[in-house]
């Protein structure tokens, strides 16, 4: 029983650290007027999520959150988290948006 409590304590502490870290990305994106598409604790691999403000049971209880520009949620794979910033594209993501002109709220339209 003691080992289970210790495991839960470590998991909670790491989740808090991940949340604070991703909140840093989120805060500076908003500070520089860059749109944030998703803010998640844990990964939503395969599109499955435990909690989401855009879909599922949570969005039915709080329908006003569906209108926010950012989707907040909790994924099912507890290996970190992420803040998906609009216009921040790397080789692992969909690069089709690179063929269009950058929008003013995208990361790639901002100066270094």
Image (spheres, rainbow, N blue to C red):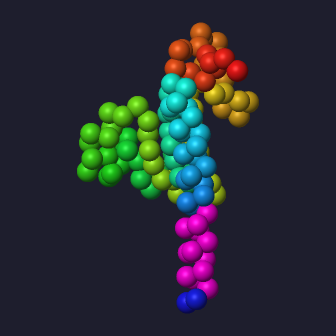
Query: Could you tell whether 109 is left or right of 75 in the image?
Result: right
4 drawn magenta: yes
Number of numbered labels in the structure image: 0
* Residue at position x 44%, y 44% in the image: 72
> The N terminus appears in which quarter of the rendering?
bottom right
Is 80 rendered above or below residue 33? below
For the stretch drawn in magenta, the main secondary structure is helix
Is 58 rendered above or below residue 13? above
Q: Position of residue 41 (x, y in %)?
A: 53, 52
Residue pushed farthest top?
101
Q: Position of residue 28 (x, y in %)?
A: 57, 34
* Residue at position x 57%, y 74% in the image: 9
Along the line of sight, the residue nearer the viewer: 26 or 7: 26
Residue 23 makes an appearance in the image:
yes
* Residue at position x 55%, y 67% in the image: 12
Q: Bounds of the magenta span?
A: 3-14
> The C terminus appears in which quarter of the rendering?
top right
Residue 46 makes an appearance in the image:
no
Is 109 rendered above or below residue 13? above
Q: Position of residue 15 (x, y in %)?
A: 57, 61
Along the line of sight, the residue nearer the viewer: 86 or 57: 86
Q: Position of residue 52 (x, y in %)?
A: 41, 47
Query: Could you tell whether 89 is left or right of 76 in the image?
Result: right
Residue pushed farthest bottom?
1
Residue pushed farthest front?
31
Hey, which quadrant is residue 29 in on the image? top right
Query: Could you tell whether 26 is left or right of 96 in the image?
Result: left
16 drawn magenta: no
Query: Could you tell whether 54 is left or right of 32 in the image?
Result: left
Is 75 rendered above or below residue 103? below
* Residue at position x 61%, y 49% in the image: 21
């Amino acid at each position: 029983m003691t080992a289970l409590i210790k495991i839960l304590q470590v998991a909670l502490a790491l989740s808090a650290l991940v949340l604070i870290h991703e909140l840093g990305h989120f805060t500076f994106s908003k500070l520089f007027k860059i749109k944030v598409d998703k803010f998640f604790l844990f990964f939503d691999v395969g599109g499955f999520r435990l909690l989401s403000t855009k879909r599922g049971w949570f969005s039915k209880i709080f329908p006003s959150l569906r209108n926010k520009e950012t989707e907040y949620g909790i994924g099912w794979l507890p290996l970190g988290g992420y803040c998906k910033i609009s216009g921040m594209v790397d080789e692992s993501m969909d690069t089709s948006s690179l063929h269009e002109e950058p929008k003013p709220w995208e990361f790639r339209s901002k100066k270094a």
